[in-house]
Image (cartoon, rainbow, N blue to C red):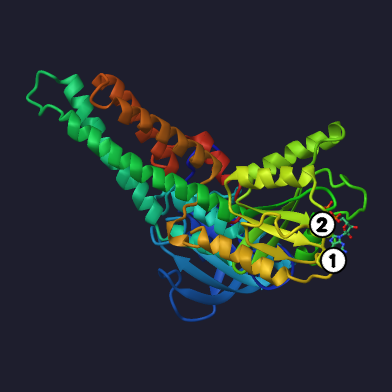
Amino acid sequence: MSKVRTDTIAAVATPPGRSAISLIRVSGPAAFEVLKRIFKTGGKKTFPLPHCAYYGSIIEPESGLVADKVLVTTFVAPHSYTGENLVEISTHGNMVVVSKVLQIVFRNGVRSAEAGEFTRRAFLNGKMDLLEVEAVSQLLSAGSMSQARLALNQLDGLPSHFVSRIRSRLLDHLVQLEASLNFPEDAIEAIDEHLLARDLKKILAELQIFADNARNGSMVAGGLKVALLGRPNSGKSSLMNYMLGRERAIVTEVPGTTRDTLEESLMIGNYAIKLIDTAGLRQPGDRIEAIGIERTRRAVDEAFALIGVFDGADLPDADDSLVMTELERAGKPFLVVRNKADLEQKLPDTFFADKNQLVISALQGSGLDRLVAELRKVIEGSGLGEYDELVLLGAQQSAALEKALVALERACAGAGRMYQDMLAIDLEEVVRELGRVNGETVDVNTLDLIFERFCIGK
Ligand code: GDP
């Protein structure tokens, strides 16, 4: 899909299978004409009036066969999802009937929509920018209410306004710079480099906050990663299984057998969490174990929070020290858990004495409610619950934002000191990259990448 198309498209917007109703969308200049040919309204109301619902029949024009009794809703351009004339046909939710209706639609000059084509048209017709497109995509895939709320907030348009406002401020500076570079002899007011440098710094600070919010947004959207760290046999897999309420990791009595990292999703309150059972930290015995430990380190780096699991029924050893060091080194919120409370306790009280500890038995499930409550406090305390601030970006948008930041940092460092033409080159890059974030300047190939993640009918 590489060109803007102005033909009329249709697709089923609801999932296949049996249901009470299915929805077929028809969008494009011929939408109403096609419906006039194949739809017979049951009432007296003229068809099609804008923004009306009609009960009637879809009829095969050649044979007069009634394919289904349906409800047809009309949306007139530009007041529709796509910004084009759009008709929604609610059929009975049986795939035999849906296929027949769709076949009739296709035989009357309409082609099958490609994945994401309705939303792509909405974007090309200015109904939404790329930030809102991303929000729609995330709303469709949200696995928790917090993820959905994040997407819904973004659909309200705040991030869109922010990026477009910042971009136009930078564009103003760029125009002035270009004017003074290209027409120095004309009586154009000389650029006040001091003022320019100050404004660029202000914009940079705002953009950095926006980028932080985007990083946090993708953490919430992807599920907050919580890694379980502990020496082999401390009970990480058992704890994970208990928290998930089902057997997922293989629990064994041979130290060092959970060699890979396992990831499982669960909900804590409204938050989607990805619990990661790591290989266990210890001095590696062999190469496979060394790989496992390497992965553990990576899991720690990617995690939002950590849970250190220690065997309360054993004396601390060098591996426990390694875990303690890793917990402290990571610089992330962490909880300390003393496991195996059902056995005689040998881990001294002095161990991690300065840190609040949770005593649990992963085997019996005791102390786990408190652990979950503490984890919830950590999440809430992190500010990630402030959905209003968070921003959702797709991979291409994130990359563009990072490039914009780097170029703007360069411009800020050079403003007042650098030749104006160099400054203009940097600002041009910032403006171009920000245009890729909200879609004001975006190439067709990138659009293909963005919209192919959508399903057909959206
Ligand atoms: P991991 O290597 O850290 O993942 O540890 P596992 O979860 O595989 O547990 C190692 C061993 O300790 C297994 O035999 C578990 O049944 C046992 N275990 C785990 N938690 C507890 C507990 O709270 N109490 C007792 N008694 N045994 C436990």
Q: Quadrant of the C terminus?
A: bottom right
Q: Decide: marks 2, 1 in contact (CB < 8 A)?
A: yes
Q: Which kind of residue does numbered mark 2 sit on? A: Gly
* Ligand 1 falls in quadrant: bottom right
- The image shows residue 191, relative to residue 121, as above or below, that is above
Q: Which kind of residue does numbered mark 1 sit on? A: Leu
Counting from the top left corner in percent of width and height, residue 127 is at 41, 54
Counting from the top left corner in percent of width and height, residue 406 is at 42, 31
Q: Which residue is mark 1?
A: 363
Image-based side of 451 in relation to 280, left or right:
left
Queried on whether the Cβ of the residue with tag 2 lies below 8 angstroms from ligand 1, the answer reads: yes
Q: Which residue is mark 2?
A: 235
Residue situated in front as seen by the camera: 139 or 414: 414
Question: Residue visible at 43% across and 61% down?
Answer: 388
Queried on whether the Cβ of the residue with tag 1 lies below 8 angstroms from ligand 1, the answer reads: yes
Q: Quadrant of the N terminus?
A: top right
Badge 2: how crowded within 10 Å, few (<14), some, or many (20+)? Answer: many
- The image shows residue 454, relative to residue 386, as above or below, that is above
Counting from the top left corner in percent of width and height, residue 246 is at 82, 65
